[in-house]
Amino acid sequence: MTYIFANWKMYLSYQEVRELSIALSQEDFDEKKLKITVFPNTINFSDVARVFAGRSFAVGAQNVGWTPQGAYTGAVSALLFQQAGAKYALVGHSERRYIFNEDNEAVHKKMEACLVEGIIPVLCIGETAEDLKEQKREYRIKKQLSKALEGLNLKGKEIIVAYEPVWAISAGGKGTPCTPADADNVHGWIKNELKQYTKQNVPILYGGSVDSKNVLSYVEQGMIDGVLVGSASTKLDEFVKLVRRVESL
């Protein structure tokens, strides 16, 4: 089984999200081979969930608030997303960490909230260009994993990890992807690290400038269980081509 997760971020207008989701809903992909999930913006979330109801697509939240209800202006809780149909939620994406100053404590709380509400959290981890230059990749990832997972009851709980080196994430399609061999090595190391937190097999996805041209070079690696796609997933023809290439394996 290969995971293809599409993070639409804030690239698309309200109408563009509606049009893209309707067009994608008309595509038939092999459910036995692929797990496809889209992560629309919060405004469009309920509409997209309705479009994909009964289809093989799942829908996920790009971010969640950790408190179920209360006086938290502007927040949307994991509970509310679960009630609206979310199966997954991105937690700790680098754009949340480095643009919105989301710290490790917030990431931990959001992981816990997702698990409590029955949403599968997709924990995003990865080093910056500075970390890589200073040979602190393993240090950074180890710290992100420990801060997010220590103290959580993961018994019988499903989680996913997305390795997204910050320096490889594209800005509108312009990025420098991590080499497949390097990504595979890091995924293997992460899988070993995760053994201290859970006995379950945790799927690990690669994210960072993934497109239809390079996707096979990642998913054909032995340690990579799928991809988290950004800007390439917002273009119908490009995303369908990407999915078809993975489906052909």
Image (spheres, grey):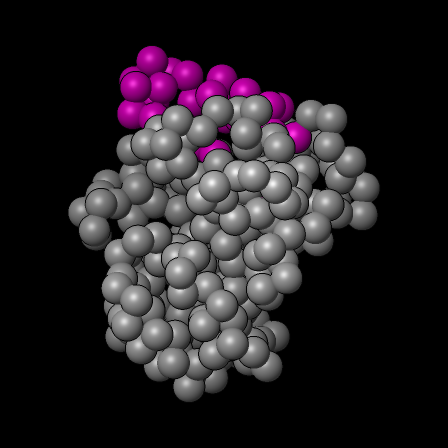
Judge whether 194 appears above or below 205 on screen: above
| Residue lying at 70% horizontally and 50% vertically, measured from the top left | 117
Q: Nearer the viewer, residue 139 or 148?
A: 148
Residue 174 placement (x, y as % from top left): 18, 47
| Residue lying at 60% horizontally and 49% vertically, measured from the top left | 78
204 falls in the magenta region: no
Residue 122 at least partly seen: no
User: Does 115 sit left or right of 140 as displayed?
Assistant: right
Judge whether 111 appears above or below 227 on screen: above
Question: What are the residue bounds of the magenta stretch?
Answer: 121-149
Judge whether 39 appears above or below 54 on screen: above
The answer to which image quadrant residue 26 occupies is bottom left
Q: Quadrant of the N terminus?
A: bottom right
| Residue lying at 43% horizontally and 22% vertically, measured from the top left | 137
Residue 97 at least partly seen: yes
Give the residue at the far top of this rendering: 134
